[in-house]
Amino acid sequence: MNNNQVNLTSVKAIYDYLDKYVVDNPNLTTQEKLEIQKRFSDRPCLWDESSGKFWQPKHTFKVEVPFFGSRRICLNISHPFAKVYQLLGQKQSPTVIDYLDFLQEIAQHSDRQPLNPEDNICVMQVFQRLEAQLSLEGGSVKNIPILNLNNQLFPANEVLIPDAHWWRDYIDSTWLLHPQVSAKLAKLAGSLSLLKDVIEIPINVKSADNIQANEWCKKWQNTLNSPEFIYGLQRLIFHYYDSQSEIDLTWLKTAKVVPASEINVDLVLQDKTKIASSIPGVYYFDVDQRFFYLTASATRYIMLCYLAEIVNIQLGNFSLDNLLPVASIIDAESENISFILNELRISSFPSEKNISADLFQDSINSKDSSSNQIYWGEF
C-alpha cells in the first residue's frame, strides 16, 4: 500500500467519523456547524476521485459550474460523504461572493498580463453571471477586477467606459473597457466614464481667420452678453430644477466667443492622472478672460452645439440634460428669447419682477430688424 492510499484511507476514516458523530449530532448547534465550515473552507480537504486531488470546500458546488473552468468543481450529491462535504463547506450554487473570489483569483494569477484563452472565456461568462446575480441579490462590487481592451484584468477604477468615441483612438487601450463587458457592470464596479469623468486641459489654442465662423461667433456673443439671455438661462434652471438658483451669471455680459483653427488638450482624471496628451479638442473656456473658444466648422449647427455644451458646463451643479433650449436661445435675437422659451413650454418665474433692473440697463434697444430671423439649425 503506497503513501497516497494510506492517506486516502486515513481521510475516509475521518469522513466516516464526522458522518457518524458530527453531521447528525443533535447536540451540535447551527453556530458550531458554521464554525466548522469557516475553519475548513479555505483548506483543501474534500477529495475528488475524478480529478485526483483535494479541493477547498469554497471551490466546490453541488451544481455544474463549467463557467469556472478547471478552477472550480461540482462534487456529486450522491457522494457517500455528501453530508460531510456540506458540513465542511461545500456550496449549493455560486453566489456573488463566489464570482468575485474567482475574478480576484484570476487577476492575481495573471498579474496584469493578458489572459490566456481559457481564462478569458471563463471571465467573460462570470461577468455575465455576476451582473445577473447582482440584479437578484444586490450588494456592493466596488473596484473589482474589470477586463480592459487588452484582455487584462485591472481594478475597475483604472478602466474607463469608452462612451466618448471621438477620444478612443488617442487613449492607450489599457485604459478602455473591453467591448464585451457590460458598461452597466463596469459603472457599478467603479469604472469612470470617458465622457463625464475625464477633464480636458487646453495646452494650445489658435484663433481662426474664417470670416463666416467669426460672423457666427460675433452674433452669438451679442446674445450671450444680453440681459435677456442671462434671464433666459435662469428661467431654464428654474424650469428643470424647480428652484431659483443663486448662480452668478452676470459675467456673461462681458464674455467673448472666438472661433479657433486648432485646440489641443490633455485628458486627465480627477486625481490629475494624464491619460492622453495634446489631442484635438473642440472647445475651451478661458475662465480668466471669459473667452469661449470654438473649433471652426463649415457647419454653423456644429459650432452652435459646441457653444451650447460649453455654456451648459459653466452652470456647474445646475447644468441641464436637455441642450435644445440652451442652443435655441443662444441662436436667437435677444428680444425673442422669452417668446422662444414660451413656445418650448419652459416655466416662467412666479413673478416677472425677478428680472433685475441692473441686468436690463445695458440692454441695446435698437437692433437691425433684418437680423430678426431665428436660425434653428438641425433641431
Image (cartoon, helix red, strand yellow):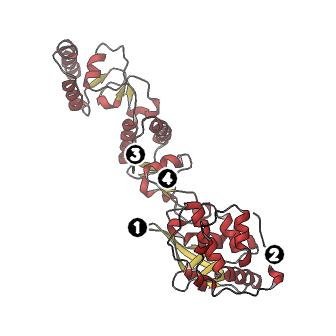
Vertical comparison of 118 with 311: above or below:
above
Residue hosting label 3: 141
Horizontally, is 350 left or right of 332 in the view?
A: left
Horizontally, is 73 left or right of 294 in the view?
A: left
Cα separation, mark 2 vs mark 1, equals 46 Å
Cα separation, mark 2 vs mark 3, equals 54 Å
Q: Residue 148 carries which label?
A: 4
Q: What residue type is labelled 4?
A: Asn
> Few, some or many C-alpha atoms within 10 Å of disc 2 (few <14, some 14-19, many ≥20)?
few
Q: What residue type is labelled 3?
A: Val
Instruction: Give whichever of 136, 13 is nearer the camera.
Output: 136
- Quarter-of-image position of residue 306: bottom right
Please state the horizontal and vertical placement of residue 300, each as a whole percent of the image: 75, 73
Residue hosting label 1: 271
Q: What element carries label 4?
A: loop
Task: Answer whether labels 1 and 3 touch (C-beta < 8 Å).
Answer: no
Give the quadrant of the N terminus. Answer: top left
Residue hosting label 2: 373
Q: Closer to the camera: disc 2 or disc 1?
A: 2
Q: Which residue is drawn at 38% across and 22% down?
A: 62
Is tag 2's residue or tag 1's residue first in the polypeptide sequence?
Answer: 1
Q: Which amino acid does label 2 sit on?
A: Gln
> Few, some or many C-alpha atoms within 10 Å of disc 4 (few <14, some 14-19, many ≥20)?
many
Q: Which amino acid does label 1 sit on?
A: Asp
Instruction: Give whichever of 342, 5 is nearer the camera.
Output: 342
Instruction: Give whichever of 308, 151 is nearer the camera.
Output: 308
The number of callouts visible is 4
Q: What element carries label 2?
A: loop
Is tag 2's residue or tag 3's residue first in the polypeptide sequence?
Answer: 3
Q: Residue 361 carries which label?
A: none
